[in-house]
Amino acid sequence: MADKKYKLTGEHFYKFFQCPHWIWYDVYGDQTKKGKIPPLIEMIHQNGLKHEKEMIKSRKFEEIKPELFRDLDEAFLATMELMKQGKNIYHGVLMEGDWVGIPDLLEAREGKSNLGDHYYVVYDVKSGRDIRDEYKFQLVFYSLILERLQGVLPRDAYIINADGEERSFMVDDFVEQFHLTRQRIEQILEGEKPPPFLKSGCKHSPWYSLCVEDTKGCDDVSLIYRLSQNDQRRLYEIGIHTVKELAAADLDNLRSRLEDWPFDKVLRIYNQAQVLVSGEPMILKKGEFPAVENEIYFDIESDPTETIDYLLGILVRHSSGKSEYKCFLAKDKSEEGKNWREFLDFLESLNDFVIYHYSYYEREVFGRLGQKYGISRALEDKFKNNTLDLHLAVVEEVILPLYFYSLKDVAQYLGFKWSAEDAGGAESVVWYNEWLKTGDQKIMDKIIKYNEDDVRATLFVKEWLEKQKPRISREKLPEE
């Protein structure tokens, strides 16, 4: 299908891990159907240089002149000249054949290579805190180009994360997996369209609407919530390609043909297929929640590009039915510690309470802020022993005719409406960056209102769950 030979770049690995169709549509798709890059992705790209320069202030690097990037061949030649001199390089261009890589940093180390008494290792600066697979594969890609240029494969590759921590991994450990992914990407670039598969990463792509359209068009089993690509292949192997085929299958027969899968997993995907076909929710069990004097609904707003957890929002609902919203706001990084201590004072004042949050993020940030700014063991236990994750409750207690189970997906399906049409966690990061630049109080008011809507949506979901009970005669429940 493809006559043109496309160059392989580090960006292809990022796109592949988000959504393999992203690469295919970029090359072969109808460009008039391409949506906008999600604002957060665009902003991270634009702010990347600022974050990188903050992270490398303590290091001495030569920078490739920006004007050379108009011609990557020129930028590559300039990079090679600096490499021969043993200079550390910021945004050097590595090229070999059809491979082009632009690592954030190239750092010289002592050791023999084609360049002389030194060789290079690669660094990338990332706004995340973990070394995700797409980061590793990009760095392996750069390291393999380096091997071709200097005759030595670096043993390690490095990431400087959002907190400025340097983390490394051994390149050799991922080379085999890298080549499998690389071959798949090259097949896509050459014109082979990936099979339909819908995943949360597709939302990061400007082609998301087409991903949904294509997957729904063939009723692919990947519409089932939390179905992995390995799971999809396994179902294909036993002749089940569509949601309707899965819903029509005999459960006992399905269980015997998937005997290597836990039964609760087989039952979950089977029930999810039934619900997608019927369009009606399935209630698995009645939600039971503790009766307390104070219910706290908790949601955090963070900005990974500024590495700050700037807003801790809570909705306090008393047993009388009265509720009040309040938030702890750090206007910048210097106020984050003070904000944390004020939140801990609030936590210490609580009695007879439960804290509801949606998904794991709030517990993760609580642990991170506790490590950074300190917390007593008593307060840490008080938080952890009195929190309930409503996302887990939703997944365990009900099955909804949805492809994703985020707070926004679930609450909107149940009838909750956010005040801002463009409300979302990613959008709030963009708003916060706009507020930092402008100081416009209307933008901060919008963020706070969005956070309040989030905690009220969490309450909305919890109240809905409380009212549900299973209809045993119609629904298949897990075996005792």
Image (tube, rainbow, N blue to C red):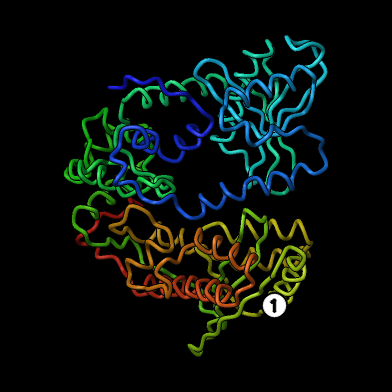
For the residue labelled by badge 1, is the local secondary structure a helix, a strand or a loop?
A: helix
User: From this viewpoint, is residue 246 visible?
Assistant: no
Give the position of the N terminus as an image quadrant.
top left
Q: In the picture shown, does residue 243 fall above or below 241?
A: below
User: From this viewpoint, is residue 291 visible?
Assistant: yes
Residue 465 in which image quadrant: bottom left
Q: Position of residue 156 (x, y in %)?
A: 70, 25
Q: In the picture shown, does residue 116 fall above or below 178?
A: above
Mark 1 residue type: Phe
Q: Residues within 10 Å of mark 1 (few under 14, many from 20)?
A: few
Residue 219 in which image quadrant: top left
- Please give the name of the residue rendered at 28% of the width and 40% of the height, measured from the top-left corner: 30
Q: In the picture shown, does residue 216 fall above or below 95?
A: below
The residue beneath circle 1 is 346
Q: Which of these two is toward me, 269 or 203?
A: 203
Q: Position of residue 79 (x, y in %)?
A: 68, 24
Residue 86 in which image quadrant: top right
Q: Position of residue 40 (x, y in %)?
A: 51, 54
Task: Please indicate whether residue 232 sits to the left or right of residue 108 in the image.
Answer: left
Task: Please indicate whether residue 457 sits to the left or right of residue 196 in the image.
Answer: right
- Please give the name of the residue rendered at 51% of the width and 28% of the height, measured from the top-left corner: 9
Q: Position of residue 307 (x, y in %)?
A: 67, 55
- Please give the name of the residue rendered at 46% of the width and 60% of the height, measured from the top-left corner: 391
Q: Which of these two is toward me, 1 or 333?
A: 1
Q: Which of these two is toward me, 401 or 96?
A: 96
Task: Please indicate whether residue 44 sits to the left or right of residue 286 in the image.
Answer: right
Task: Please indicate whether residue 474 sits to the left or right of residue 207 in the image.
Answer: left
How many dots with numbers? 1
